[in-house]
Image (cartoon, rainbow, N blue to C red):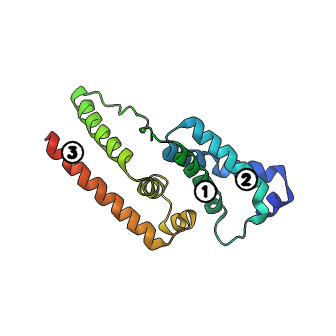
Amino acid sequence: MIKNLIKGKETAYKEVIDLYGDQLFRTCYLILRDKLDAEDVVQETLIKVFKNIKNFKGDSKLYTWIYKIALNLSRDILRKKVDFSSLEDEWIGEEDPHFHIEKEIDKEVLKKELKALNPIYYEVLVLFYLQEFPIKEIARMLETSEGTVKSRLSRARNILKTELEKEESLIG
């Protein structure tokens, strides 16, 4: 596929989009929390991939290189924004209104705490737990060591745990 991309074959472009497009959009959306920004980043990422495929050295998987480009573009957008918008609400689908209200309170607390996280912690949580990338791949994408990724994950979990325990003691 990479050879065909370098040759400029249209079928290779379509294959990249089919293989990585949806997952790339989900990752960008989770990081940016904005559909239009995520769509723009995906489009710009793919353009950069197609224009710069000759620069791909092959020292990582292709998708790692692609996601690294997308993450950098997403970071650029986040740096320009002062306000981090909250996660989109999702319907839980339970019939019991008390259950629904309780879950909504829990979701609101979690969203509040996620929103308050430093973007470097939020980013590794998204990549590890929601996109299920291995630590090694996350380290390559973020251009950092595996130890740093593990440290950020640990720190993010501890921050969330502490803040959620505080919220629970206030509520409960």
**Residue mark closest to the camera, 1 vs 3:** 3
Picture coordinates of residue 30 (x, y %)?
Answer: 49, 45
**Mark 3: few, some, or many residues within 10 Å (few <14, many ≥20)?**
some
Can residue 1 be seen by looking at this rendering? no
Q: Are marks 1 and 3 in contact (CB under 8 Å)?
A: no
Can residue 148 be seen by looking at this rendering? yes
Q: Which residue is mark 2?
A: 48
- Residue 67: mark: 1
Kind of residue indicated by mark 3 = Glu
Tag 1 secondary structure? helix
**Residue mark closest to the camera, 1 vs 2:** 2
**Mark 1: few, some, or many residues within 10 Å (few <14, many ≥20)?**
many
- Tell me which corner region of the image, top left, top right, bottom left or bottom right, holds residue 155: bottom left
As measured in the structure, the alpha-carbon distance from the residue carrying label 2 to the one carrying label 3 is: 43 Å
Q: Which residue is mark 3?
A: 167
Q: How many marks on residues?
A: 3
Q: Which residue is more in the foreground, 46 or 155?
A: 155
- Tell me which corner region of the image, top left, top right, bottom left or bottom right, holds residue 128: bottom left
Sequence-wise, which precedes: disc 1 or disc 3? Answer: 1
As measured in the structure, the alpha-carbon distance from the residue carrying label 1 to the one carrying label 3 is: 34 Å
Kind of residue indicated by mark 1 = Tyr
Horizontal side of 142 relative to 147 (left or right) equals: right
Horizontal side of 97 relative to 26 (left or right) equals: left
Kind of residue indicated by mark 2 = Lys
Picture coordinates of residue 159 (x, y %)?
Answer: 30, 56
Quadrant the C terminus occupies? top left
Sequence-wise, which precedes: disc 2 or disc 3? Answer: 2
Q: Which residue is more in the foreground, 133 or 28?
A: 28
Sequence-wise, which precedes: disc 1 or disc 2? Answer: 2
Q: Residue at x 39, y 62 (%)?
A: 153
Q: Residue at x 55, y 51 (%)?
A: 75
